[in-house]
Structures are given as structure tokens and as C-alpha cells.
Image (cartoon, rainbow, N blue to C red):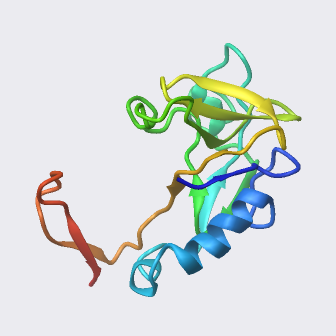
């Protein structure tokens, strides 16, 4: 369970504190070469801000219709989930007060996190060290070689 500060500003990139950790130390020390080779080298991460009472769709789109992608983005190998992506039940309910950073800014000085009750919060950057749940995209030639996806028999994958 790694915890770190988000960085000095709300903009995720390969150069801010959390982006540097994910695309440096995490890839070099937590992921082996075979696994790293299966990850897309460059993914676009959309950084739309979602304020209080606004739709989570604004994390990726300019409006809630979902037709126009936000121009606020960065490109890295490893990122974080945006607000609205796989949040319910994805936090560690067994670690008291566990919070994880999200990619989504709240406004120009605060970034969002998700708590162990699956509620979203926001706080100033640099204010706390929270957990990290890396997000990544696999290359299109990664295939499932065995398993059925259950806890007892997880998928095994490989490059085709």
C-alpha cells in the first residue's frame, strides 16, 4: 500500500510527483519487464475538472452529452482513474480511512480522491499522502492465455 502526495499542482503529468512515481519507480520496481511490455506506451489521460454538483462526465468531456472530449489531457504510460470510473466497491473497505488519488481535478487548486466508503472528496494538492491505484491500458495484441477471470482461476495474459 504505497501512499504519496499528488504533487504541487492539480495537473497530472509524467513530471508531477504522482506521475513521476507511476511512470518511474512503479514501472521499474513493481512491474516486471514482461508485464511492462504489455502496457501501451502512451495513453491519453483526460483531465477535465468536476466541481461540486456537476456530472462526472466532465472528467472526460466538455459537456454531459459525451460528444466532445475535453482538451485538458496528458499522455503517459501509467495514470490514475478519473472520477466515475470503477469507483463503487473498488476501494479498500478494510483499511480504515483509506483514500486513493483520482486523476480528476475539482478546481484550479484542489484534486479529487476516493475514500473507503466509495465517496469522492477533494482537497488542496500537497495537503496529504494518499494511496495510489495505477491505471493502464494494455496493448491491442495482448491476449488471454488461460483462466476464467475468477479469484480462484484468474486470467493469465501474454503478448500475441
Residue 38 % position (x, y): 41, 78
Residue displayed at 82% across by 44% down: 10
Image-quadrant location for residue 68: top right
Query: Looking at this view, is 106 or 72 the one in front?
Result: 106
* Placement of 129 over or under 53, stated as above or below: below
Quarter of the view holding residue 153: bottom left
Q: Residue at x 80, y 49 (%)?
A: 11
Residue 110 shown left or right of residue 147 in the figure = right
Question: Residue 108 in the image: x percent, y percent?
Answer: 88, 35
Tell how many labels. 0
Please report the residue visible at 57 percent of the width from the left and 27 percent of the height from the top.
65
What is the quadrant of the C terminus in the image?
Answer: bottom left
Q: Is residue 32 left or right of residue 43?
A: left
Residue 12 at x, y percent in the picture: 75, 53
Q: Nearer the viewer, residue 143 or 127?
A: 127
Q: Residue at x 12, y 55 (%)?
A: 152
Q: Residue lying furthest top in this view?
A: 53
Q: Quadrant of residue 58?
A: top right
In this rendering, the answer to whether 7 lies above or below 107 is below
Q: Position of residue 45 (x, y in %)?
A: 63, 54
State the residue in front, 65 or 113. 113
Residue 61 or residue 49, whichever sits in front: 49
Amino acid at each position: 500500500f504505497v501512499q504519496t502526495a499528488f504533487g504541487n499542482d492539480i495537473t497530472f503529468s509524467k513530471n508531477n510527483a504522482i506521475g513521476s512515481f507511476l511512470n518511474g519507480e512503479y514501472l521499474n520496481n513493481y512491474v516486471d519487464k514482461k508485464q511492462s511490455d504489455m502496457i501501451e506506451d502512451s495513453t491519453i489521460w483526460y483531465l477535465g475538472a468536476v466541481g461540486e454538483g456537476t456530472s462526472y462526465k466532465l472528467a472526460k468531456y466538455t459537456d454531459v452529452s459525451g460528444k466532445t472530449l475535453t482538451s485538458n489531457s496528458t499522455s503517459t504510460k501509467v495514470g490514475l482513474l478519473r472520477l466515475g470510473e470503477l469507483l463503487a466497491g473498488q476501494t479498500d473497505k478494510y483499511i480504515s480511512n483509506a483514500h486513493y488519488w483520482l486523476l480528476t481535478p475539482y478546481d484550479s487548486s484542489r484534486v479529487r480522491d476516493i475514500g473507503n466508503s466509495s465517496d469522492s472528496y477533494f482537497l488542496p494538492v500537497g495537503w496529504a499522502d494518499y494511496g495510489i491505484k495505477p491505471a493502464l491500458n494494455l496493448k491491442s495484441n495482448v491476449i488471454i492465455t488461460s483462466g476464467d477471470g475468477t479469484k480462484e482461476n484468474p486470467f493469465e495474459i501474454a503478448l500475441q
